[in-house]
């Protein structure tokens, strides 16, 4: 369900960060069994967005990430 190909495919629907223009990606933490969004700010930018956010589903994560402002 959370293999690398699926995580990469779902991450393509995440828009760039409105604060720094950096990217985000879904990651699955095997040890804790958590699906997370990891924010990768552009180099040299101190971005106010959180770097990691736990989400229950891909849809929840996409909604959370894509509707920030």
Image (cartoon, grey):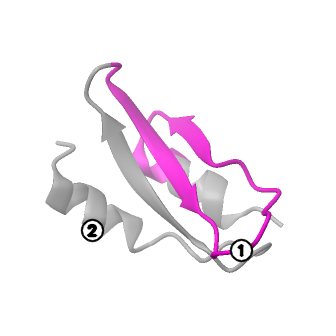
- Between circles 1 and 2, the one closer to the viewer is 1
Q: Would residue 56 be counted in the magenta stretch?
A: yes
Give percent across and percent down for residue 27. 36, 47
Over which residues does the magenta segment extend?
A: 32-60
Query: Which residue is tagged 1?
Result: 44
Q: Secondary structure at mark 2?
A: helix
Q: Nearer the viewer, residue 55 or 21?
A: 21
Q: Secondary structure at mark 1?
A: loop
Residue at 39% from the left image edge and 74% from the top image edge: 12
Give percent across and percent down for residue 22. 62, 74
Give percent across and percent down for residue 18. 76, 75
Badge 1 crowding class, 10 Å Cα cut-off, few under 14, some 14 to 19, many 20 or more, is: few
Q: Nearer the viewer, residue 5 or 46?
A: 46
Q: CA distance from mark 1 to mark 2?
A: 27 Å
Give percent across and percent down for residue 66. 64, 66
Q: Is residue 53 left or right of residue 2?
A: right
Check residue 9 in the rendering and tell me which mark sits there, or answer none.
2
Q: Quick check: 46 above or below 59?
A: below
Residue at 83% from the left image edge and 57% from the top image edge: 48
Check residue 25 in the rendering and tell me which mark sits there, or answer none.
none
Residue at 21% from the left image edge and 44% from the top image edge: 2
Point out the image quarter for the N terminus.
top left
Occupied quadrant, residue 5: bottom left
């Amino acid at each position: 369900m959370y293999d690398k190909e699926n995580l990469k495919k779902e991450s393509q629907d995440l828009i760039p960060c409105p604060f720094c223009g950096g990217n985000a990606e879904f990651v699955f933490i095997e040890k804790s069994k958590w699906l997370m969004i990891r924010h990768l700010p552009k180099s040299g930018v101190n971005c106010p967005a959180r770097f990691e956010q736990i989400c229950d589903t891909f849809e929840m994560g996409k909604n959370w990430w894509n509707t920030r402002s």
